[in-house]
Amino acid sequence: MSVTVSVIVPVHGTARHAGRAVGSVLATHVPEGVVVDLVVVDDASTFDVDSLVRDAPLPVRVVRHDVPRGPSAARNTGLAAATGDYVWFVGADDWVDPGLLAALTDAAPDADIVVAGTVPVTEDGVTGPPLPRRATGTVWTGPQAVEEFLRQRIRAGVTNKLVRRDLFDGLSFPLGPRHEDVAVMAWLLLRARAVAYVPAPGYFHLRRPVSGYNPRVADRAAAVDEALFVLSGAGSPAARLRFRLRAGVLAVAGAAARSTAGELSVDAWQAVRTARLAVRPGDAWSALRHRQPGLAAGVLLIRLAPALYIRLYRAARAVPPRSGPVAVLAGAGRA
C-alpha cells in the first residue's frame, strides 16, 4: 500500500541548527511504496534557506513568511501546504535518524498516529534516556493512548509523531503562547482510533540550557488546563490528577527553581506563588488515594513550604539520589 508523507520543518534562528534538521530529513531512507515531500517554512529567517535544500533528493517546497510570526503560525502554514496522507513535524533544533521514516510508515497502516522514541540531547552532545521508556513497540486504542498521554508517557509535543493529516481537520495551533501544541495533541489523540509506538530508530530533541527565568513558562499550566478541558471525561481520575499537577503546577515551579542557581527573581517567585495557589486543598489526599506518594509530598510542600520545595528540588537535580524524600520530590516536579 502506498503512503504519502509531508514532512514539515519550520525554520527560524541559526543556520547550523536548521541545516542539521533539514539535512537529516533529506538523508532519510525512503522505503518502497512511500512518497515523501518536504515543506520548509521560512519564518523570516536571516540566512539563505534555499541553500539548505539545493540539489535535494526529495521534492521540496519552501513557504515564506515576510515577518517572523512564531512557531504556531509556521506550523499552521506548513499544515496548509501539506498534501500527504500523513504529516510529520520536525523541530528546527532537532534531527532524525535516517531509518526513522521507514519505522514510522511501517507502523502507519495500523494507526492514525505513530509515536517515535525521543532521545533528549544537550548542546554538548550528552544524551538522556529515550522517552517514553519502552523497549518494544506497541499499539494503543485511542482511549489507551489518552491515558498514556495523561501519565506523560506520550510526549505532549507534535514533533516526534507521524499523524494522519485528516485528524487536523478544523484544528490549528493557537498563536502566541508557548507549549502551543499540548491542547492540539490532546485533540489528535481524542480523534485517533489507534496509536502506535516505535522505540527506535530515534528522534533527537535538542535541550537548550536554561539561562534565566522566562515568565512565559506559565503558559505551560494554561496549556495543561486547556488539554484537560479538551479531554473532559477521558482518562482515569488518577491520570488526570497526575497530568494537572505534574505536567502543569509542579512543572512551572520546577522551571522557576532551575532557572538560576541563586535567589529566584521576582518573576520566578511569582510563578511559584501562582503554582501554590493552583494546588487544591484535597490534592495531596487525592494523590495518596491514587497511590502517588511522591506527588502528594510535592504538592504538600509547594503549598505549605514553597522555599523548602525549591531547595529540595535543586538538591535533587544537582546530585540525583537513589532514594529518599529528595528523590521523590524531584520525580514529582519534573516535567
Image: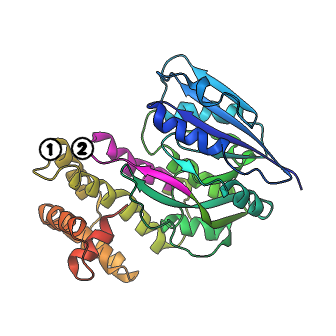
> Given contact means CB atoms under 8 Å apart, are the residues at marks 2 and 1 in contact?
yes
Question: Residue 18 in the image: x percent, y percent?
Answer: 51, 36
The answer to whether 73 is drawn above or below residue 285 in the figure is: above
Q: Nearer the viewer, residue 276 or 133?
A: 133
Is 69 left or right of 221, judged from the image as shown?
right
Magenta span has 215?
Answer: yes
Question: Residue 116 in the image: x percent, y percent?
Answer: 60, 60
Give the extent of the magenta segment.
203-227
Is 83 left or right of 79, judged from the image as shown?
right
Residue extending furthest top? 66
Question: Residue 61 in the image: x percent, y percent?
Answer: 70, 28
Tell me where residue 254 sits by quadrant: bottom left
> Which amino acid, mark 1?
Ser
Question: Residue 227 in the image: x percent, y percent?
Answer: 50, 53
Q: Check residue 279 in the rendering and tell me which mark sits there, or answer none.
A: none
Q: Which residue is mark 2?
A: 213
Tell me, yes or no, if residue 234 can be seen here. no
The answer to whether 294 is drawn above or below residue 280 in the figure is: below
Tell me where residue 113 sits by quadrant: bottom right
Q: Which residue is mark 1?
A: 265
